[in-house]
Amino acid sequence: MGTNSLSFLFLALFVLLIFSAFSSGSETGMMASNKVKLRNLSKGTKGAKRALKLLQRPDILLSSILIGNNFANILASAIVTIIMIDYFGGNVLLGSIILTLVILVFSEITPKTIASVYPENFATKSSWLLKLLVIIFKPLVWLTNIVSSRILKIFNVDPLGSASNDDLNTEELRTLLDEHGDLIPNQSREMLSSILGMEELTVEDIMTPHAEIIGIDITDSIEAAQEIIKSSYYSRLPVFKGSIDSVIGVLHLKESHQFIEALEEETNIKDLLSETTFISQSTTISTQLNKFQQQDNNLSLVVDEYGEIQGLLTLEDIFTEIVGKFGAARAELEKEFLKKKDGSVIADGNSRIRELNNFMDWDIDEDGSKTINGAITDFLDQIPQENVCLEIGNYRIEILKIEDNFISKAKIHRK
């Protein structure tokens, strides 16, 4: 052993430690890489394509990396032993301690930290050498995988199942947007989150309630019909006789001139109206959006299981749910929900809980009643006869005014 050159041994040791550092960093970089980012990089980077292909079989990739890493560390240990015996009086224990510290600092902690900070960059640049390692160690990998696969079966683990881990459900994708979407403009992030929530919302959540439906009553004066048409926020309006329960059809505002003329001349107006469509209040928003597209229609009346009209839904309501309220609509909310200095809100009893939650960024339960009046009545299991104060979840509600067995004003404060 005396013929060995000390400089050659140190050079070999240095190369092995570099290889060990590469293996450790590559392992962390490949496993910590965001596959979505890699797919995006793969459109113009061959390294990202190679990394994605290697990650399709993580068992083979990990086996190749670990074989190479262990080979380098064991061979480095052998070289240190030779150096300590031949040149430093046989103090092998000291050599083992020094080597352990060097491997920990320079071949484990440092490269793994760098790889964890820049995983996609590390994975992309190391993929070509990793592919070469997979080819070189293929016989050994095949042999070790035969044994490891038997062990994995005992624990009911499928190595190929890691590919499905990249699939995100709606809730996970929304969480990803909320927590890691800083590079996406806030308004766009809110819109994407609203779209993802469409599967959970039903038309009952965003419809205009029965009592608030605005339409044209042909039993009223022509001037009243003209005023409703003039001030309408929607492009279509329901036309009824006496009440919305006696709906005749739906008027498109582009036909409003002929409609008014027909009313003045007392001629048949049905030819100017489109057929009324009805939808169940349990229909999801996403389903109804598809129906609006298929039917080339943007207004439907919402009915319950008994066929009684409960509200009205338009395409504009769905778009407003996605993009948020604009200008005048936002100003109306500010009038509807009066914010006080103590953080409380004074609201009408018929105000919708969902709109209050969106306006104040609160989380009052929306699963039951949709209005403040309904929520209070359900909680008390009766119609309150006097002003009372109650707590629903984390919210303190004080009834301020009751009119005709209906809560007209309430003060709400989050605890």
Image: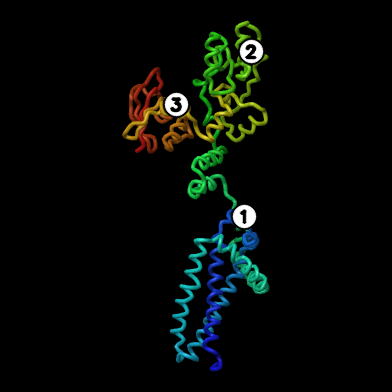
Q: Nearer the viewer, residue 386 or 276?
A: 276
Q: Quadrant of residue 288?
A: top right
Badge 2: few (under 14), some or many (20 or more) residues near its Cα, within 10 Å? few
Whether tag 2 and tag 3 are in contact, CB under 8 A, the answer is no
Badge 3: few (under 14), some or many (20 or more) residues near its Cα, within 10 Å? few
Which of the two discs, 1 and 2, labels the residue nearer the N terminus? 1
Left or right side of 257 for 323: left
Residue matched to label 1: 39
Residue matched to label 2: 258
Q: Residue at x 64, y 63 (%)?
A: 54
Give the CA distance from mark 3 to mark 1: 45 Å
Q: How many marks?
A: 3
Residue 324's spot in the image, x, y percent? 50, 34
The type of residue carrying mark 1 is Arg
Q: Is residue 339 above or below residue 71?
A: above
Whether tag 1 and tag 2 are in contact, CB under 8 A, the answer is no
The type of residue carrying mark 2 is Gln
Residue 209's spot in the image, x, y percent? 51, 24
Badge 1: few (under 14), some or many (20 or more) residues near its Cα, within 10 Å? some
Q: Secondary structure at mark 3?
A: helix
Q: Residue at x 68, y 73 (%)?
A: 139
Residue matched to label 3: 332
Q: Quadrant of residue 52?
A: bottom right
Asked whether residue 131 appears in the rendered view, the answer is yes
Which of the two discs, 2 and 3, labels the residue nearer the N terminus? 2
